[in-house]
Each structure stands twice: as structure tokens, then as C-alpha cells.
Image (cartoon, rainbow, N blue to C red):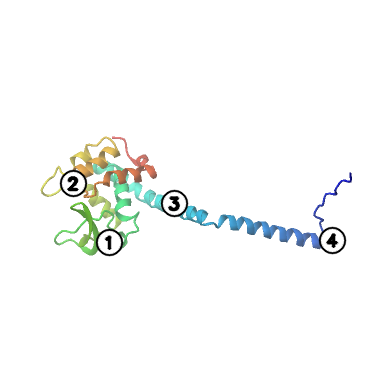
Amino acid sequence: MARRKRKFIKLPRNKKAKRRYFAVLFVLLALVVAAATLTPSFLQRRQDQLLEDAHSNQLKKWAPYAQQLQQQDGVFASISLAQAALESDFGQSDLAKRAHNLYGVKAGAGQPSVTMATKEYEDGEWKTVDAAFVSYSSWQASMKAHAELLKNGTAWNPTQYAHVLSAKDYKEAAQGLVKDGYATDPDYAAKLVRVIEKYNLHRFDIAQ
């Protein structure tokens, strides 16, 4: 029985033709690789990674000052950072950009302010309302005012945030914010903990 001859791709004998052949082959391979990396799932993963890197860089920028405030006022750096990230969308919210307000702090009488729409959780549902928010001179001023609020409490209750200050770790502090009435969102503590653990923010906390 006769054997079939195997067919092989014959390379051109001419050197110039060979170079052209390999150049075309290289381009085709590059196109195949490019097509594979431009799939929607790849692009989405890449976009998510870039966003996460941007968030991480923003948190690292804030971290040294958050640590300084922990030493001065006793608020965990991870809590200050997570609240800033959550409240200001990692410094990208309109309020953060326009007024350096990282925590959504509302303005009192006589304070520099900007008026913006915000969502409030009332009577079991979210509502959109217009409110006046403090306009700070810098993001550092916003972080300092936030730490001092938690340390000194409110005008009507100096021990308002006692559970936050007495917490042994960031999880207790997050629960303390809800217990002490800082936020109306019932899921606020869980959201803070997710941010802290996703970005490993507890590494910035200074041992008590």
C-alpha cells in the first residue's frame, strides 16, 4: 500500500522573499493576539484594574495625614480613609472637587458652603434633597474637621461618638459610627469594612 507524502509549507528560497514571509507571519500573529486581548471581558477587566489602581493611589495620598490625625484625635486611620473614599467616591465626587468636602459634611450658619443635591435615607427609603455643604480650603482641612468632630462630639452631646473612639479595631469603629448616629444608611458599617478590607487600609492603623 502506497504511503501518502506529507505536505509541508515550503519556505521561499530567496532571502528577500523569506523576510517578507516572516514579516507577514509576524503581523498575522500580532493581529490574532490583539484580537484576543480586545474582547469585551478583557477590556472590562482592564478598566476595572485601572480604576482600582487609581483608587489605591488616592488612598495612599491621604494615608499619611490620616495617620497623623489618628495620633492627634484617636480615630483609626482606616476609618478616616474608608469614610472619605465612600463619601467622596475616592475624591471624585462633585462635592469633593468643588469644595474639598470628603465626608458630605453639611454647613451650619455662617460657614462657607455650596448647595448640592444629595440622597438621604428616611422612613425606609432613599430620597433626593438639596442641601448646603461645607466648603473647605483643602482636603486636609476636611479630614481634620471630620476627626475633630468624632473626637469632640456635637454641640449638644460631646460624647456623641464614644463608641467610635473606644473601639479596639476598625470593625468596632465602623459599627460605632452607626450606633452613635453618624450615618442614616443601615448598611454603612458593612460598606466601610468592605472598603477597608478590599484596599487593606487597616495596615495604616497605628497600634493603640
Q: Residue 181 carries which label?
A: 2
Q: Which mark is residue 14?
A: 4
**Contact between labelled residues 4 and 1, with CB atoms less than 8 Å apart:** no
Q: Is residue 135 visible?
A: no
Q: Where is residue 54 in the image (x, y as percent from the top left)?
A: 42, 54
| Residue wearing tag 1 | 99
Above-or-below relation of 137 to 3: below
**Contact between labelled residues 4 and 3, with CB atoms less than 8 Å apart:** no
- Which amino acid type is shown beneath numbered disc 3? Asp
Q: Residue 53 carries which label?
A: 3
- Which amino acid type is shown beneath numbered disc 2? Gly
Position of the C terminus, as image quadrant, is: top left
- Answer with mark 3 or mark 4, whichever residue precedes in sequence: 4
User: Helix or strand or loop: what does disc 3 sit on?
Assistant: helix
Q: In this view, does 127 lie to the left or right of 61?
A: left
- Which amino acid type is shown beneath numbered disc 4? Asn
The residues tagged by marks 1 and 4 sit, at their Cα atoms, a distance apart of: 70 Å
Q: Position of residue 35 (x, y in %)?
A: 59, 58
